[in-house]
Image (tube, coloured by chain):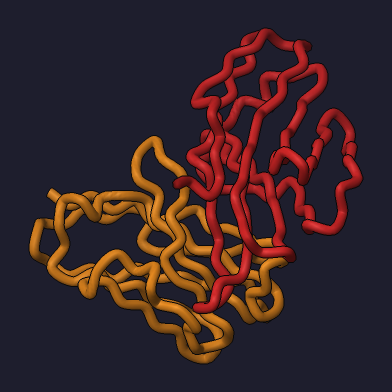
C-alpha cells in the first residue's frame, strides 16, 4: 500500500481559478511530519510547507493554504487565484519513524498546468 | 549561500558499467539524503546519512548500490554493473541537523542517469 497517495496525476486550470491538490497518507506513527514540495520545470524541488502530527491548524501563506485533517489522514493544498508560474509538479511527503530509523515517503506527484 | 550541488548533471553509460554520482550538501548541514526519481514518478527514498553514518541502508534497491559520506560533507552514490532499470534522476538533499523526521530537506538539481 502507498504511504502517500496523490490521486490526481494531472490537473489543468485556467489562470485565476482556485485549485486543490489532494494528499492522503498512511502511518502508524504518532509523531510524524507532512510536507509539500514544488518541482518546477527546471527540476529542483522547492520546500513549501511542513506540518507535524500534533498541529492541525490550517495554514495560509499568500495564495497558498493547507488543510490538515488527521481524521481523514489528509493534507490537502489549495492554490487561490492560480498563476502560470504555479505550473509545476507538486509532491506531498510523509516522514515517520520505523524501527530501522527515520523513513521518508513521497507521493507520485500532481502535475499542475495553469493555462493563461 | 550555495545550495546542494550534484555532479555530473547528466550521465550516459553502457549497461554493465559502474557509475559514481556525487553530492555536495549545503555547508554545515549534518544530514544528507539520496532519492531516485524514475520518469514521471515520485521520489523513492534510498538512504540518508547522519554525519558520516547511515542508520538504515534497507532502501537501497540492490547490493549493486552503495553510498558513502566522508568528512560530514561530500557523499558518493555508486551503482555497480548498471542496468537499464537504473535509468532515473538521482536526487540528493541535505538538512541542517541529524535527519530527524521534521527537518526540511533542501534538494539539489539531480543527476540524470541513462543506461543504454
Q: Quadrant of residue A21?
A: top right
Residue at 51%, 69% (x, y): give it: B33
Q: Quadrant of residue B66?
A: bottom left
Residue name at image x 36 percent, y 61 percent: B8
Tell me: residue B35, above or below residue A86. below
Q: Give the residue furthest to the bottom.
A: B71
Marks counted in the figure total: 0
In the displayed structure, would residue A103 be above or below residue A70?
Answer: below
The chain whose colour is orange is: B
Residue B38 location in percent, x, y?
A: 35, 45
Q: Is residue A37 left or right of residue A71?
A: left
Image location of residue A34, percent across then percent down: 70, 52
Q: Nearer the viewer, residue A94 or B114?
A: A94
The residue nearer to you, when weighing A93 against B53, is A93
Figure quadrant of the C terminus of chain A = top right
Q: Give the residue drawn at x 39%, y 35%.
A: B40
- Which residue is depicted at the point 8% across and 64% down? B16
Image side of residue A97 versus residue B42, left or right: right
Chain A colour as displayed:
red
Where on the picture, by quarter, is residue B7? bottom left
Is B52 located above or below residue B61 in the figure? below
The front one of B38 and A29 is A29
Amino acid at each position: 500500500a502507498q504511504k502517500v497517495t496523490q490521486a490526481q496525476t494531472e490537473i489543468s486550470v485556467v489562470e485565476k481559478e482556485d485549485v486543490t491538490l489532494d494528499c492522503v497518507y498512511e502511518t502508524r506513527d504518532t509523531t510524524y511530519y507532512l510536507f509539500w514540495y514544488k518541482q518546477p520545470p527546471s527540476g529542483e524541488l522547492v520546500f513549501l510547507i511542513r506540518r507535524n502530527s500534533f498541529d492541525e491548524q490550517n495554514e495560509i501563506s499568500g495564495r497558498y493554504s493547507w488543510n490538515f485533517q488527521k481524521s481523514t489522514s489528509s493534507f490537502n493544498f489549495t492554490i487561490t487565484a492560480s498563476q502560470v508560474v504555479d505550473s509545476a509538479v507538486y509532491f506531498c511527503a510523509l516522514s515517520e519513524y520505523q524501527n530501522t530509523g527515520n523513513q521518508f515517503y513521497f507521493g507520485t506527484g500532481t502535475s499542475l498546468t495553469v493555462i493563461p | 549561500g550555495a545550495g546542494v550541488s550534484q555532479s555530473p548533471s547528466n550521465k550516459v553509460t553502457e549497461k554493465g558499467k559502474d557509475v559514481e554520482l556525487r553530492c555536495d550538501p549545503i555547508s554545515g548541514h549534518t544530514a544528507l539524503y539520496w532519492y531516485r526519481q524514475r520518469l514521471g514518478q515520485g521520489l523513492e527514498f534510498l538512504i540518508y546519512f547522519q554525519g558520516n553514518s547511515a542508520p538504515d541502508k534497507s532502501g537501497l534497491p540492490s547490493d549493486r548500490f552503495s553510498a558513502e559520506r566522508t568528512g560530514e560533507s561530500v557523499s558518493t552514490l555508486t551503482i555497480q554493473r548498471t542496468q537499464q532499470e537504473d535509468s532515473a534522476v538521482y536526487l540528493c538533499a541535505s538538512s541542517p541537523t541529524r535527519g530527524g523526521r521534521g527537518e526540511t530537506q533542501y534538494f539539489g538539481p539531480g543527476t540524470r542517469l541513462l543506461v543504454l
